[in-house]
Amino acid sequence: RLELKLASEEKQPEIMLEIANVLDRDLGQHDAACEQLEKLYERTGACGLGYAPLYKMYETHENWRQLVDIMLEHAQALLDCGEDDIEAVSTLNQALNIVDDKLHDNAKALEIIEKIRVFDPDNTEIFDRYCASLRVNEAWDKYADTIRAKVGVSVSKKSNNKHLFFELARIQNLALHQSEEAIKTYRMINTSGGNVERNAYFGIATIARNEGNKELYLQTLDQVLKLLPPTWGAIFYCHMAEVADEMENAPQVATYYRSARMLDANNVNASESLRS
């Protein structure tokens, strides 16, 4: 310790490191060694002499949260110093792995992923991991914004990302309680080119049914029937007749049953209802 006090400014960090090594390796005083390395780290910075030995110390003694903290500081220091982004992103990914495997801290994971996405926004694995963290943290607004940003607004993108539109509609309806926005999203799915998705129509129908909007419910089912085999179409028309009956719309009831029989002459429900 006397040698440290007498040493020049530029020599002191090396002596501090040696003192830490002696405390840890020779005397078994791990806490004191860790304290010495933390002082060295504070003095030399996140890219300085103290980073690597303190990293090793934290890792060896499984001080995972402290390890993640200095890794994040190290990554930021690399960027501030104008170093290659690749090393900074690699450090962030390593920190994320520790958070996932050791800390199971979703909020911390989300913080790290957001930093990674700044430098690698098109990484599919990171995007999926980011969405998973948003779901776990129930950050629904941010989750919806993230999906919107991913799919963009061009027709060509819509046809390639329909699964994301379905997810967006689901979140808008169930988590954000924005049923009108969810209906718009479902409709957008089938205006994007490619195959028509009957599940988009079913999504709208479900919302309409839950909200008691029977007119929209029937209109939507009428659209989806064109995508079903005749036998199933007839079954749906019979169901729609029952809904129209609830609305006390007798002419529409008869129309639906006739449509059912046209699709499937063997549909007993339609035939008997028309005879009655």
Image: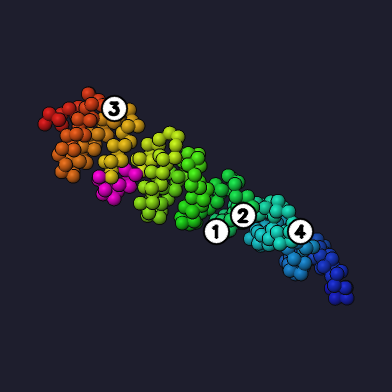
Q: Is residue 256 left or right of residue 204?
A: left
Mark 1–mark 2 Cα distance, whole angstroms, equals 17 Å
Amino acid type of the residue tagged 1 in the rendering: Ala
Cα–Cα span, label 4 and label 3: 70 Å
Q: How many marks?
A: 4
Q: Where, by quadrant of the figure, is residue 188 drawn?
A: top left
Q: Residues within 10 Å of mark 1 (few under 14, many from 20)?
A: some
- Using the image, tell me which numbered label, if any, was put on residue 107: 1
Q: Earlier in the sequence, mark 1 or mark 4?
A: 4
Mark 4 or 3, closer to the camera: 3
Q: What is the three-letter code of the residue carrying label 4?
A: Ala
Of tags 2 and 3, the one toward the viewer is 2
Residue 3, x across and y down, in percent = 88, 73
Residue that carries the numbered disc 3 in the rendered image: 231
Mark number for residue 118?
2
For the residues bearing labels 1 and 4, Cβ distance under 8 angstroms: no
Residue assigned mark 4? 52
Q: CA distance from mark 2 to mark 3?
A: 52 Å
Residue 236 percent location from the top left of the image: 27, 34
Cα–Cα gap, marks 1 and 4? 26 Å
Q: Earlier in the sequence, mark 1 or mark 3?
A: 1
